Image (spheres, helix red, strand yellow):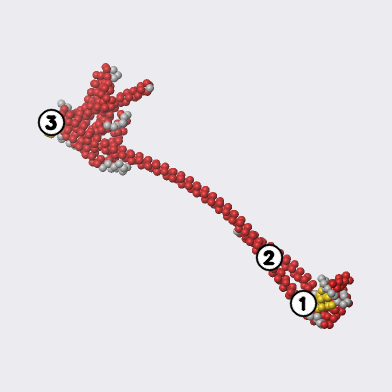
Amino acid sequence: MDLMTIKDISPDQVIFWEWGCISLNATILFTWIVMALITIVSWLVTRHLSTDVHMSRWQNLLEVIVDGMQNEIREISQQDPGSYLYFVGTLFLFILISNIFSIIPGYVAPTASLSTTAALAVCVFAAVPFYGIIRRGLGGYLRQYIEPTALMLPFNIIGELSRTLALAVRLFGNMMSGAKIGAILLAITPFIFPVVMHALGLLTGVIQAYIFAVLATVYIASATRIQEREKRKQEAEKGEKS
Amino acid sequence: MLIDWFTVVAQVVNFLILVALLKHFLYDRIIKAMDAREERVRSRLESAEKREKESEEEAGRYRRRHQEIEEERKAIMDKAREEADRQLKELTRQARQDVEIMRSRWQEAIGREKEAFLRELRQLVKDQVYVLSRQVLRDLADVSLEERLIHVFLDEIEKIGEEERNRMAKAMQGDGNHAIVRSGFEISGTERQKITRVLHDTILKDADIKYETDPEVIAGIELRGRGQKIAWSFDNYLKDLEEKTRVALDRISNIEPTGTEQKAEKSETKA
């Protein structure tokens, strides 16, 4: 914990360079590092992809990850993964890698910053109507807020906002607290116990990445699945008329 | 303040950039590779199935062809067997025929040989008996065989019955009172007179008797008138001997062909 003192709650507070309102803080820096790492590894591995049954271990790993994510999305949303994979998969990979690297001394997980988690939650908040409108159109998407009655509109809006807030705070709280608890324990019992906490922190990090991705999928799916139900209903009505 | 709005915006932008980067460098490529592999495996499986199907069809065709060939082979074998049987029968028949022809030829040859042998035998026996008898008679009685023959001949003439005597006389009269006495040897003048006298006494008084010598009449003597003959010669005995010999040879030759038939039958069984 060289970079951040125990008083610093968020890595946003560690600023390397500042010009006007633009500041390069630890969150952005580590985000870039994580991004660069993921992108470079992906590029290196996917440079020479084999379409034969024989392939490199790295390619196999990436295929397992991508295929696993596709299956998970398909299972949760009951829909074809399609373009959800790009969004949900990137969410999962970014949070996972950010969290896992937190065992490296000197590294601060970007997800331990409320700004990052808020940004990701905002992305999910935007993605839900984005996919919903793409799937069912603007009117169809907006109609779900006044269903079953118009009285539900405020509650639906509050629900939408609150779950976004919950997403952001859940991830931030877990990651930040994990890092802080580790730091505090290190001060109290410098041997063995912090290692256990670190291991627990890794587990929490992986679980949080999974939870965030699953919840994002569930929200997007709920916004698009209504359309599926309606489509079925419309088809049934058509069938009855004919 | 825990939330730095600039950082939030920056992170949103960062995240969207990451989505774009991963879409390009990771998801699209990996999914494309997986789809390509899936397609490849599927096409391989399809081609393998196709090949399996083809090979099964090919195997079926081969089985059918094999069966056809087997049937053809059987048919050809049956035909060949029939042909062989037919040829065997034909050859057997021909062999039998040949054997039959050979046997008949052989029998003919045997017959001819037998005839020749008998002829020779007869001739030999006649000669030998003649020589032997003359020698024996000469040695024992001290008279020539011709004399003995003439004596026996004259005895025979004197012994003949009335009826035969008349028939002979008539025959001589029909020929102008001519008669011929034939002998296998030369008859001396004395003997001729003696014979002539006996003939004049017994048959015809004024008969004109001529004497001829014929080697065929072995050790014998005969009187010939027109269509009538009174004779005594070894021929009588020789003919009897010849007849007995022929019977004996016939018995032998009847046994021989039977043996040949058995041999022919054996050769048929072998064929």
Residue B135 picture quarter: bottom right
Q: Read off the chain for label 1.
A: B
Residue A215 picture quarter: top left
Whether tag 3 and tag 2 are in contact, CB under 8 A, the answer is no
Q: Is residue B9 left or right of residue B122?
A: left
Q: Secondary structure at mark 2?
A: helix
Q: Amino acid at mark 3?
A: Ile
Query: CA gap, disc 2 to disc 1?
Result: 35 Å
Q: Is residue B20 above or below residue B142?
A: above
Q: Residues within 10 Å of mark 3 (few under 14, many from 20)?
A: few
Which residue corresponds to mark 3?
A22
Both marks 1 and 3 on one chain: no
Q: Residue at x 29, y 33 (%)?
A: A69
Whether tag 1 and tag 3 are in contact, CB under 8 A, the answer is no
Q: Residue at x 76, y 69 (%)?
A: B243
Dot 2 or dot 1: first in sequence order is 2
Q: Is residue B91 above or below residue B193?
A: above
Query: CA gap, disc 3 to disc 2?
Result: 146 Å
Which residue corresponds to mark 1?
B214
Q: Amino acid at mark 2?
A: Gln
Q: Foreground residue, B77 or A27?
A: B77
Q: Amino acid at mark 1?
A: Asp
Q: Quadrant of the N terminus of chain A?
A: top left
Q: Is residue A173 left or right of residue B104?
A: left
Q: Secondary structure at mark 3?
A: strand
Q: Foreground residue, A80 or B201?
A: B201
Q: Residues within 10 Å of mark 2 (few under 14, many from 20)?
A: some
Q: Quadrant of the C terminus of chain A?
A: top left
Which residue corresponds to mark 2?
B107
Q: Read off the chain for label 2.
A: B
Q: Residues within 10 Å of mark 1 (few under 14, many from 20)?
A: some
